[in-house]
Amino acid sequence: MPADAETPLQTGLSDWAEELVPCGPLVQQLLPFAASLDVEPASKTAWWPALLLKLVPQLRSEPFLVVAVCGGTNTGKSLVTNALVGAEVSRSVPEAARTRHPVASLPPGMATRIDLAAVFPGFVPTAWKSQADPLRDDPENLLVWRERSGVAADEHGRQILLDTPDIDGTLQENRERAELIRDTADVIVAVLTEQKYNDAVVRDFFRAAAATGKPFVVVVNMVDWPRQREVIPGWIETFERETGSSPEAVFAVPHDAAAAAAGRLAFKRVAGGPADEAAADPLAVVAAADFDRLKLRSLRGAVETVLDEASGLPAWLATVEAAGRDWQEARRLLSSDARVELELPQPPSELVWDEIWDWLRPRRSGFDLAISRTYATLGRGLGWAAGRVGLLPTAARRREDFAGSERDALKLALGRFIERLDACCRANAAVERLFGPRLRTGDRAAWFADLERRQRALPLMSDDYRRQVRAELDRFADSRPDAVRWILTGLNVGAAVRPAVTVALWSAGAAAVPAAAATAGGLSALVHHVGDVVVGAAASLAGEGAISATVSGIKPLLDRLFAGWAVERGRILAETLQLVVLGDDLEEVDRRAAAGERPELPLLRRHLTRCRRLLAEGEVPR
């Protein structure tokens, strides 16, 4: 093999890193959207620690073995760790649950080569100062580390050995810290005793480690040797059956109080090799094993956990997508079945036309303006006289009539919307969860009162709409200066015949527009229809028919102006729906529907597909 050829381990690390390291940030980006869909928190799944605590951190670092010494209360974990390291790095005390923070024994120089915080997510690395460090009562998850020296440093140069808190103690934070280390580890040294080898909590802890394919070495501590030598195989058989583990080796440590006080333990190998092998211990077994095989076995187990179709990341993504589809259907249902059509009554047409004439006034000739004022005065007089005899309503009366008809139309639309939203709740569980309680307990009389209040507060011609009209007309003048000149010419020419136009009723067909829909949160479309607008003599509207019929581009302009006014009126209903009836829940539908369409989903699927191909093709050896 060429000197620079990659080993199977290097190939495996490179292949997995290419596909799995990008999955880390993609999953993190997806978390808030999954939470909005009420999907099971990713941190509660088996694949989460396999991906985020083990694969992503370790695939970005130099290869090493994380060997974790784990066990229940009073099993002697710290004593076993100190004996394996050859130094008292973790104080061994008789009281239970005293080791609060994991202690890492590192090969010389490793602390400067790797980022311990990245390799052990969730922990704050702290350099070892004394044996009391792991016993410190600190709310943070500390990782107390110390580099080895002497013989142990040479024999186990690529092993990080960790002592962990109790896995079954009364302190929840201790158990959680032990689980974090377990999930990061490559090899588990399970410290058992006669009392703890089949305890339920202990079984569950080690079963979770075995499920991800981690190699085990078992140490049965405090054994009455040699009397109990014959019963140890039965204990181990039960442990293997209950946890699904298959230990690389099993050691027994005779109970010897004097030797333990001096930090000396005699490891007796009882399985996985020659019995009573001299000078054997768990780290020696790990060191003698094929490093690449152990590391790849641990990584492959984590990858298989992530890829599991039933309980891995693919299943979680499928849950996110399915929940998203539910909300997409809810959004579709609301946008179709809850849609209401707001039919506004015929507006007083002078509202818009007066703004147009005000904009045109500075651009008109003196002759035209003089005649216009004359006929405007005459028109108002005729309109007043017609109103007095009942032939034509006054301007004030027309506006009052419109306001009353508009309120009726708005209330009718609100009532229809409530009925349709109630039907949507019955048809879709997602809609029911958000809006059902509000519909059943809401004060509907207050909703209608709010709608009327908003309608009365909005003037028929608001300042915002005036600005919109002038901006629209300015844009038209900038883009169509010739059309403006034609309009002004038409006004001058038409001035001589205004009496006939002004006195008569004129149907301004250009103002009959179906306005664009204003929406409440993008869902409940409110379609506004402005009927045919009839222009009366009192409005001084001479010339509109000629302008609309002869000047190219004027009709779309007039359509936009009348449509803009209609949309502003319809916004009264939209605001009541959004702010009073629906509240923030309408935006929540959009957010949840969009969560199932996130771009992270297909990207993660592609990475997982390529990972599965690596497994199937055997490119990453077992």
Image (tube, helix red, strand yellow):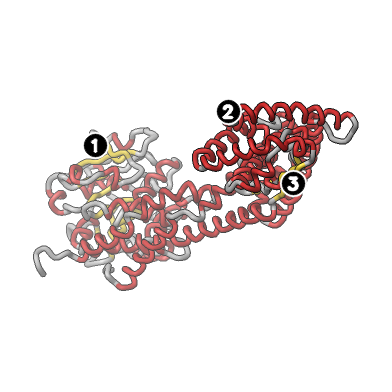
- Mark 1 crowd level (few <14, some 14–19, many ≥20, 10 Å Cα): some
Of marks 2 and 1, which one's residue comes earlier in the chain? Answer: 1
User: In the rendered picture of this protein, how many numbered marks are placed on residues?
Assistant: 3
Residue picked out by circle 1: 128
Q: Quadrant of residue 562?
A: top right
Q: Residue at x 31, y 68 (%)?
A: 614
> Is there a contact, CB below 8 Å, between mark 2 and mark 3?
no
Above or below, 144 relative to 463: below
Left or right relative to 129: residue 328 = right
Q: Earlier in the sequence, mark 3 or mark 1?
A: 1
Whole-percent x, y for residue 219 in the image: 30, 56
- Camera-nearest label, 3 or 1: 3
Which residue is tagged 2? 362
The image shows residue 291 at horizontal and vertical percentages of: 21, 61
Callout 2: SS: helix
Quadrant into which the C terminus falls: bottom left
53 or 149: which is nearer to us? Answer: 53
Q: Which mark is residue 499?
A: none
Q: Quadrant of residue 459?
A: top right
Please give left or right for residue 614 compared with residue 438 in the image: left
Q: Residue at x 72, y 49 (%)?
A: 341
* Mark 2 and mark 1: Cα distance apart in space: 85 Å
**Residue drawn 14% across and 65% down?**
5
Confirm whether residue 447 shows in the render: no
Q: Residues within 10 Å of mark 2 (few under 14, many from 20)?
A: few
Q: CA distance from mark 2 to mark 3?
A: 29 Å
Residue lying at 29% horizontally and 57% vertically, measured from the top left: 187
Q: Amino acid at mark 2?
A: Pro
- Percent of width and height locating residue 22: 33, 54
Q: Is residue 379 visible?
A: yes
**Residue carrying label 3:** 532
